[in-house]
């Protein structure tokens, strides 16, 4: 999901329908089909809604009359708040953000609390490096060269992860493959760990492929035997 500040610039407040103290992270989703500016936004997806954003009175509608862009915050059955020892005991889903960083007109962010531990080390900083060495490498991000700060590397990898996840979801939809929810979660988790483990060149190659937005076939290839 693209996090464009313009998409949420007309927000007035954030309404939490559950106490956020019970959530290290929540899933943040944007809907363009809300029928009102301020009433609760219905949630028809998996899991349950735990919050939503309301809009100012003068917030414009979308291209479709009577439809507004609003944020929804939700959790799934296998999220850490529901299963503390589940697949997200550490790390977060691609939509995951710390609800304490959410504010009207401000996108949520991933924190150490949301991640369940220290944020991943950028690929240009070896895990074995001492703390002074790590800090020195991060400071090099202000100078020309391939080195990047931990925050920048983290955001880029999150963007790649989201693109790959969406492409995989589109493929499943076109091929009409039914995959149990637990299997889908396991695949997503392993994919994230794999992305973090590989070098910058590989991550850059995946990002380039996602950016080209290769068009998927309108119909899945026939598997009927002649």
Image (spheres, rainbow, N blue to C red):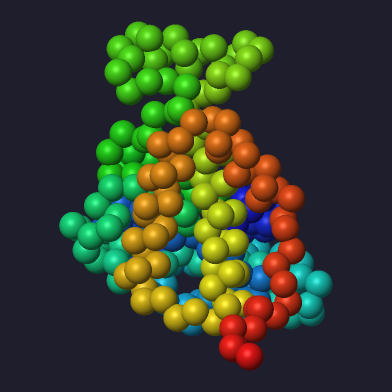
- Most foreground residue, 38 or 92: 92
Would you say 16 lies left or right of 39 here?
A: left
Q: Residue at x 40, y 36 (%)?
A: 197
The C terminus - image quarter: bottom right
Q: Residue at x 34, y 47 (%)?
A: 91
Q: Residue at x 54, y 68 (%)?
A: 169
* Tally of numbered discs: 0
Would you say 70 lies left or right of 127 here?
A: right
Q: Residue at x 36, y 35 (%)?
A: 119
Q: Position of residue 16 (x, y in %)?
A: 40, 64
Q: Position of residue 68 (x, y in %)?
A: 68, 72
Would you say 43 lies left or right of 8 here?
A: left
Q: Choose top left, top right, bottom left or bottom right for residue 15.
A: bottom left
Q: Choose top left, top right, bottom left or bottom right for residue 60.
A: bottom right
Is any atom of residue 28 visible in this view?
Answer: yes
Q: Residue furthest front?
A: 226
Q: Please, is residue 205 above or below residue 85 in the view?
A: above
Q: Position of residue 165 (x, y in %)?
A: 52, 59
The N terminus - image quarter: bottom right
């Amino acid at each position: 999901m693209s996090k464009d500040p313009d998409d949420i610039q007309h927000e007035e407040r954030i309404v939490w329908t559950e106490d956020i103290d019970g959530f290290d992270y929540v899933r943040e989703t944007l809907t363009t089909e809300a029928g009102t500016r301020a009433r609760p936004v219905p949630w028809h997806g998996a899991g349950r809604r735990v919050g939503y954003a309301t809009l100012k009175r003068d917030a414009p509608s979308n291209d479709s009359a009577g439809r507004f862009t609003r944020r929804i915050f939700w959790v799934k059955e296998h999220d850490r708040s529901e299963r503390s020892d589940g697949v997200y005991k550490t790390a977060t889903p691609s939509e995951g953000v710390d609800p304490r960083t959410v504010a009207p007109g401000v996108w949520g962010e991933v924190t150490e609390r949301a991640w369940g531990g220290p944020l991943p080390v950028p690929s240009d900083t070896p895990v074995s490096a001492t703390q002074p060495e790590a800090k020195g490498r991060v400071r090099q991000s202000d100078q020309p060269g391939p080195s990047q700060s931990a925050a920048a590397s983290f955001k880029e990898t999150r963007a790649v992860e989201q693109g790959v996840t969406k492409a995989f979801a589109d493929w499943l939809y076109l091929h009409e493959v039914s995959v149990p929810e637990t299997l889908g979660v396991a695949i997503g988790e392993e994919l994230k760990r794999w992305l973090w483990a590989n070098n910058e060149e590989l991550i850059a190659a995946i990002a380039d492929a996602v950016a080209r937005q290769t068009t998927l076939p309108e119909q899945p290839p026939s598997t009927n035997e002649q």
